[in-house]
Image (cartoon, rainbow, N blue to C red):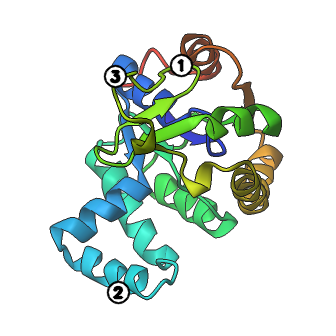
Amino acid sequence: MKVVLFGPPGVGKGSQARFLSDREGAVHISTGVLLRRAIRSGTELGQKAQSYVESGKLVPGVLVRALAEDAIRATNFKGFVLDGYPRTIEQAEWLDEFLQEEGTQLDTVLSLEVPADVIIDRLSKRRVDKETGENYHLDFKPPPADIPADRIIQRKDDMPDAILHRLEIYDKETHPVQDWYRQRGMLQEIDGRGSFEEVYGRIVNAIPTSRSAS
């Protein structure tokens, strides 16, 4: 299984990638996680990336590419789910070139699709305990009654206007990449509405080699 997974904030992409990792044996590769880990570990690449992060600049694509390729190579190309990479057409071309050089290719590219109003409703109901950092959701995981109300806050990023702005940025950034894959007949759009299990079932059914990642 060699898959790229797209999805806007609030669509459940990270959870589905972890499902695929736990149940199908594919390695979940999140470039955001890898980048933060490299910075914390103080690796040479992490030190280079940290200088950009601290100055408020985007980490250069070549550094993210190196992280992604190292992580993919570590799987021995037997099974991975890419989350957060590629984000640009240039990165998509790099990934295609890298896999070709290694004698392999992606099985498919999946895009989880959920209407914006549903995503806004989901994310705007998230709450955080400002003392512990524990996340809650007003519908699915309400804060315990014994926690003082003034400890439960709504992050600025989870305000409806902020969510809409994040979705607009995501759409602007990822549509060209999705179109690039669509033109190559690789993109499949998956309905991201419903329970995690329902969405997971749709994802597994869409992956040609989901049961034979080896």
Give the amino acid at mark 2: Ser
Cα separation, mark 3 vs mark 1, equals 22 Å
Earlier in the chain: of badge 3 and badge 2, it is: 3
Q: Position of residue 120 (x, y in %)?
A: 73, 39
Q: Position of residue 79 (x, y in %)?
A: 39, 33
Relative placement, left or right, of 26 versus 173 is: left
Q: Which mark is residue 22?
A: 3
Secondary structure category for the residue under label 3: helix
Depicted 85 relative to depicted 26: above or below: below
Cα separation, mark 3 vs mark 2, equals 34 Å
Earlier in the chain: of badge 1 and badge 2, it is: 2
Q: Which image quadrant is residue 199 in? A: top right
Q: Nearer the viewer, residue 188 or 6?
A: 6
- Quadrant assignment for the C terminus: top left
Q: Which image quadrant is residue 146 in? A: top left
Which tag is nearer the camera, tag 3 or tag 1?
A: 1
- Residue visible at 25% across and 81% down in the picture: 47
Give the residue at mark 1. 140
Depicted 164 relative to depicted 13: above or below: below
Give the amino acid at mark 3: Asp
For the image shown, how many numbered marks are present on the structure?
A: 3
Give the residue at mark 2. 51
Q: Nearer the viewer, residue 99 or 84?
A: 84
